[in-house]
Image (tube, grey):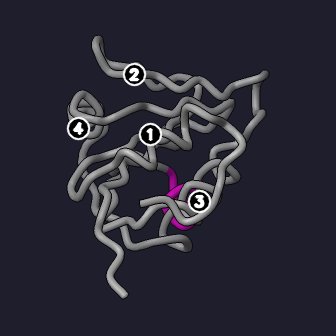
């Protein structure tokens, strides 16, 4: 269930339709999108929008039960993700496999290697 309104209509609809356990992937400009997985391409140009702005906006809208990032991510990327929410770690190949089952892959203009995250929807109680 969405908390507020988002500017991007397709992203807003996708978040509103997430059920418990569904996942949404937010990735850098180079993350491959699996065949058959919808892609919400937000990239305007290199670096715009940055992944962190998109992630912060999505976290304001989505109840996240768990998140996965790649073990190959740099310490700076890992720290930036962990500052926002607890994360589990998987190989980049496993992260790409997890994205095949996503409701959508959100592509940002981010150019930082391995700046990708899989967010699993939880349920907001209370």
Contact check, label 1 and label 3, Cβ < 8 Å: no
Report the mark closest to the observer, 2 or 3: 2
Q: CA separation, marks 1 and 2? A: 10 Å
Classify residue 86 by image quadrant.
bottom left
Nearest to N terminus: mark 2 or mark 4? 2
Magenta stretch, overall SS: helix
Q: Nearer the viewer, residue 110 or 6?
A: 6
**Percent x, y for residue 66?**
30, 65
**Percent x, y for residue 82?**
48, 70
As drawn, the label of residue 38 is: 2
* Numbered range of the magenta stretch: 74-79
Q: CA separation, marks 3 and 4? A: 23 Å
Nearest to N terminus: mark 4 or mark 1? 1
Contact check, label 4 and label 1, Cβ < 8 Å: no
Nearest to N terminus: mark 3 or mark 4? 3
Q: CA separation, marks 4 and 1? A: 17 Å
Q: Which residue is mark 4?
A: 98
Q: Which residue is mark 1?
A: 14
Q: Residue shown at 29%/11% (left/top)?
A: 35
Q: Nearer the viewer, residue 7 or 26?
A: 7
Nearest to N terminus: mark 1 or mark 3? 1
């Amino acid at each position: 269930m969405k908390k507020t309104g988002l500017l991007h209509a397709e992203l807003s609809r996708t978040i509103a339709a997430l059920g418990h356990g569904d996942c949404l992937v937010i990735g850098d400009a180079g993350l491959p999108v699996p065949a058959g997985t919808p892609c919400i391409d937000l990239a305007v140009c290199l670096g715009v929008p940055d992944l962190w702005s998109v992630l912060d906006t999505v976290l304001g809208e989505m109840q996240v039960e768990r998140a996965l990032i790649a073990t190959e991510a740099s310490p700076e990327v890992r720290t930036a993700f962990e500052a926002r929410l607890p994360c589990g770690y998987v190989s980049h190949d496993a992260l790409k496999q997890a994205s095949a089952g996503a409701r959508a892959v959100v592509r940002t203009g981010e150019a930082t290697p391995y700046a990708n995250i899989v967010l699993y929807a939880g349920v907001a109680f209370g």
